[in-house]
Image (cartoon, rainbow, N blue to C red):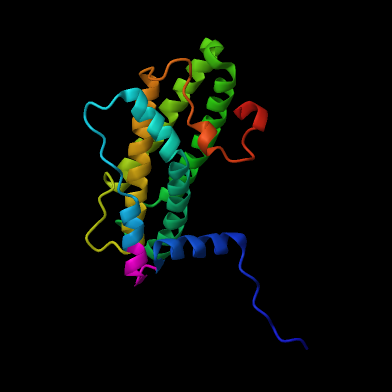
Amino acid sequence: MCPHHPDPPSPDDRLQAETLERWGVRRCDAVDRVTFNAGLSSLIETETAADDDPQLRLARLQRDEGEAIRKRLADAVTLARTGERAHRTDDLWPHGIVDELYDLLQDLEAHDAHEAFARSAGGTASPPLRAGLRDDHAALAARLEVLRRLTGDYEAPAHACAVWRLLYVLSLKVDRALAERMRLEDAGIGVGAPQSYGAVILSPDKVTADAAA
């Protein structure tokens, strides 16, 4: 009889392990302080002057932070799943946050595809298409509001572990970046759009190359 060999890790298991190792939080009680602190330091953004030109600010958000938003949100989903398993009996854990973050990521990618299509139309994008983009923004804003409510505005309780605290930091960063970007887009900053950050952070399977051009 052949000896039993454990099943190889699934892609989801490998993704979780890679994400936790990259942030230095293999488990709630096993933190690599050097890696963890370096990751937090990487999240520090350059402060923008109060009188910074809004169009330049939007361009920086799209150019410099577009990919970062998707990665932070994807990492937050993984951290939430890890925390859910560890803290599912804790009344202060934000139960339901895994689904909310995952749905936000899916809605964001769908909206990105819509924006990429709108970009292909340039200044001739139809009023219904523009209205659809505004509806997307409203749906994303509602998702963010649910996250704020679940997390108490991203304030972790005193006993929260490193995974829990990091989850809230990443969620807060995503919230602020998306909220500011949508505010600028809704204000009409950036002539000739609808402005798109979708072309920066599209998943390859969400839209064709021609549509994103």
> Foreground residue, 168 or 181?
181
Magenta run includes residue 35: yes
Question: What is the span of residues highlighted in magenta in the rendered image?
Answer: 27-36
Res 24 quadrant in image: bottom left
On the question of residue 96 being in view, the answer is no
Residue 123 image point, x, y percent = 52, 12
> Foreground residue, 88 or 71?
71
Is 73 located above or below residue 92 in the figure?
above
208 relative to 61 in the view: left or right: right
On the question of residue 179 being in view, the answer is yes
Is 132 located above or below residue 145 in the figure?
above
Residue at point 30% right, 24% down? 53
Residue at point 34% right, 31% down? 180
149 relative to 25 in the view: left or right: left
> Foreground residue, 158 or 43?
43
Residue at point 34% right, 60% down? 38
Q: Quadrant of the C terminus?
A: top right
Is 101 located above or below residue 5 in the figure?
above
Hey, which residue is sitting farthest right in the picture? 1
Residue 191 image point, x, y percent = 43, 15
Res 172 quadrant in image: top left
Residue at point 42% right, 51% down? 76
Residue 6 image point, x, y percent = 64, 77
Is 10 located above or below residue 155 in the figure?
below
